[in-house]
Image (cartoon, grey):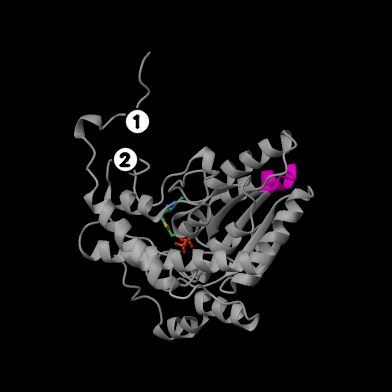
Amino acid sequence: MDHATALRLYEAMLLTRLTEERLVKLFRQGKTLGSVYRSLGQEATACATAAALGPEDVIAPLIRNLGSMLVRGVQPEEIFLQYLGRATSPTGGRDHNNHFGGISRGIIATSSMLGALIPVMAGVALSFKQRNERRVAMTWIGDGGSSTGAFYEGLNFAVVQKLPLIVVGEANGYAFSTPPDRQMAGHLSNRAQGAFTLTVDGNDAAAVYTAAAQARQRCLEGHGPVFLVCETFRLSGHAEHDDQRYVDPALLEAWRPKDPIPRFEAWMGQRHWTLEPGLADRLAADLAAAADRALAAPWPDPASLTDGVFQSGS
Ligand SMILES: Cc1ncc(C[n+]2csc(CCOP(=O)(O)OP(=O)(O)O)c2C)c(N)n1
């Protein structure tokens, strides 16, 4: 990774954290419609994997992968508008949080049905292969989501067809309140039979980036899908309405010092790569202004409720 890439990656992780912190404030003020889903402590897995892609590649993020969307240029204001349900949000107030995408941005919108995006992205990867395009498809899945049938169906198809698909597995300690040993046999790394599997320290952004770049190269060389497992930990509840009381406090204390953001800052420091002075303050000020603009945005017109929901015309 060169200095410029490292700076972009650092900024993306910090922006993810600060955007989510601003969302938590909006939630506590009772302004968001519904809860707020964070990636606290695991920002490196979404940001560093997405940062290793090219602009021609296509991603399908889950709720905890906001960072991957910011890497690809989604604006925090769009996220605020979504959480606030406003008319000018990407879904016009019809869907919530980061549930939006766009073909021109190379983002397939999240589906709440865990696992469902893996067959979808296998299909995207199939289209790249059929058209001889040098592009990869990437999506993410949690340890809980890897227990769905769709996870196996999608990966199996990608293995058999040798598709350029990267599935990032986030081993983050809990699926809602369920630890992996209560819902799966073995470790996440053993679940993608036939796919080349890499397991990395998911809180080491440089290692995640390197592994993702390697996975992409393998896909482009036609070797089939890669399952990239990132060992990390969810430092907040499933969402803001969940106080994580089921997590042993000692476990949280053990993971807090592994925070990927100061860790990556130290990694950059070892290379004498300096950060922009006052970066966090600049981002926080921009986010506060974006949140204020989103709060002032109009609500959807009730008369437009079914627009875009049903096909119009005959
Ligand atoms: C097929 C399916 N089953 C159940 C749910 C409800 N649900 C939403 S998030 C979640 C936990 C997901 O855990 P994991 O996949 O480990 O991801 P994490 O939340 O840890 O990032 C569950 C069970 C769902 N969205 N889809």
Q: Which residue is mark 1?
A: 309
Quadrant of the rendering where the N terminus is positioned: bottom right
Q: Which mark is residue 10?
A: none
In the picture, measured across the screen, residue 173 lies left or right of residue 96, that is right
Confirm whether the magenta stretch covers residue 160.
yes
Closest to the observer, 273 or 265 = 273
Instruction: Please state the extent of the stretch shown in magenta in the rendering.
Output: 156-164
**Which residue is rendered at x = 55% and y = 78% of the image?**
265
Q: Which mark is residue 94?
A: 2
Residue found farthest to the top: 314
Confirm whether the magenta stretch covers residue 174.
no
Q: Earlier in the sequence, mark 2 or mark 1?
A: 2
Mark 1: amino acid:
Val
Residue 194 x/y as whole percent: 73, 54
Distance from mark 2 CB to nearest ligand 1 atom below 8 Å = no
Closest to the observer, 70 or 235 = 70
Closest to the observer, 18 or 153 = 18
In the picture, measured across the screen, residue 126 lies left or right of residue 309, that is right
Q: Above or below — where is 122 with respect to 261?
A: above
Q: Is residue 288 visible?
A: yes
Residue 204 x/y as whole percent: 59, 74
**Prevailing secondary structure of the magenta residues:** helix
Residue 294 x/y as whole percent: 28, 52
Q: Is residue 33 visible?
A: no
Check whether the beta carbons of the residues at disc 2 and disc 1 lie within 8 A of each other. Answer: yes
Quadrant of the rendering where the C terminus is positioned: top left
